[in-house]
Image: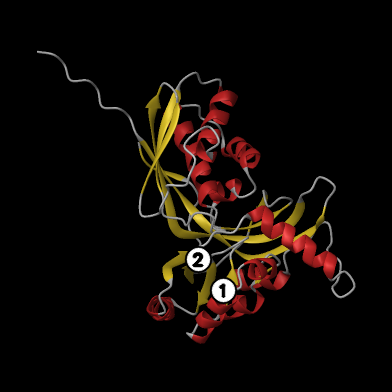
Amino acid sequence: MTAAAPPIRVVHVTAPGKINVFMKVGALLEDGYHDVATAYQALSILEHVRARPADDFSVSFSGPIDTSGLAVDGSNLAIRAARLLARVADYRGGVHLDIEKHVPIAGGMGGGSADAAATLVACDHLWGTNLGRDELLSLAAELGADVPFALMGGTAVGTGRGDRLSPALAQGTFHWVLVLADVGLSTPQVYSELDEHRERHVHDIAPAVEAPTVDVEVLQALRAGDPHQLAEYLHNDLQAPALHLEPSLSRTIEEGERAGALSGIVSGSGPTVAFLAADADAALELQVALSAGRHRVIRATGPVHGARVVSG
């Protein structure tokens, strides 16, 4: 009697999408980048990454999100994450990643960053490389500004490129309703539009500082767990350029606030619009109202944990 082959080990890791409840963008630096000051919150919209041993590096997609436009070659951020960890840990094998996507693509919610963070955790677990959290955070920062936060989760202040993180105290649960746009916005294009806006209005607005900070009122609202207080201080320097590039987002914000949202904000570089609701009932009513207006809507809560192993 021939013994059955042992089952192939699969490690399942989840990582959250995010919104930026506050974002200030510093002046354009000589290297073409900007320093930012942002307050991240991880949301209950999770990417699922399942990693299994392979001879090479590959990725496939599943889930409710249309992934037909995503790269599956070495330019994919999750594959880059796996290759980086293999190189640092001197691991000679490969991995196949199946990514079940739930975070909107090109929506300013860090779905690709969540995939990369989940991949680092999954491969570290699968391969037994046992890197510490600090070393994984260092690798995450090499991959992109939002990847370390997807690894950390919760609520945090990000400075520098957004990758220098400090945990922020946040009480209770915040309720969000997210409206997904039918178009994507290019992050470099939104930043370029911001720079052009500042150049056009150089005599009318205060000059951007090189090293911005998060307003203390935002941190106090998060610490108090008070959605009404937080709604007063939601802010995103990238919102104006995003609205200029996609004017329909202005109408979406107005519609959501008329329907009962405490406040609405473009998340990151957009085009997802995040509405803060007073409580779970208000979020449900807002979701129903916006869905009736033929918007694609997701209801979510935050903060939630960062990338973590579910099984395997």
Whichever of labels 2 and 1 marks the residue nearer the N terminus, that label is 2
Q: What element carries label 2?
A: loop
Q: Is residue 204 left or right of residue 158?
A: right
Front residue of this view, candidates 65 and 176 = 65
Residue at horizontal 48%, vertical 32%? 124
Q: In this view, does 181 lie to the left or right of 195?
A: left
- Kindly tell me whether residue 18 is visible in this rendering: yes
The percent position of residue 180, horizontal first and vertical second, equals 48, 65
Color scheme of the displayed model: secondary structure
The percent position of residue 75, horizontal first and vertical second, equals 55, 36
Q: Is mark 1 on a helix, strand or loop?
A: helix
The percent position of residue 61, horizontal first and vertical second, equals 39, 43
Give the amino acid at mark 2. Ala
Residue at horizontal 58%, vertical 24%? 87
- Kindly tell me whether residue 261 is visible in this rendering: no
Residue at horizontal 83%, vertical 57%? 210
Q: Is residue 175 above or below residue 100?
A: below
Please say if the residues under marks 2 and 1 sit with CB atoms less than 8 Å apart. Answer: yes
Q: How many labels does the image show?
A: 2
Give the amino acid at mark 1. Ser
Disc marking residue 181: 2
Mark 1 — residue? 248
Rounded to the nearest angstrom, the CA distance separating label 2 from label 1 is: 9 Å
Front residue of this view, candidates 192 and 179 = 192
Q: Is residue 186 above or below residue 93?
A: below
Q: Is residue 255 left or right of residue 160?
A: left
Residue at horizontal 56%, vertical 74%? 248
The percent position of residue 62, horizontal first and vertical second, equals 36, 46
Query: How many other residues sit within 10 Å of disc 1, few (<14), some (14-19) or many (≥20)?
Result: few
Query: How many other residues sit within 10 Å of disc 2, few (<14), some (14-19) or many (≥20)?
Result: many
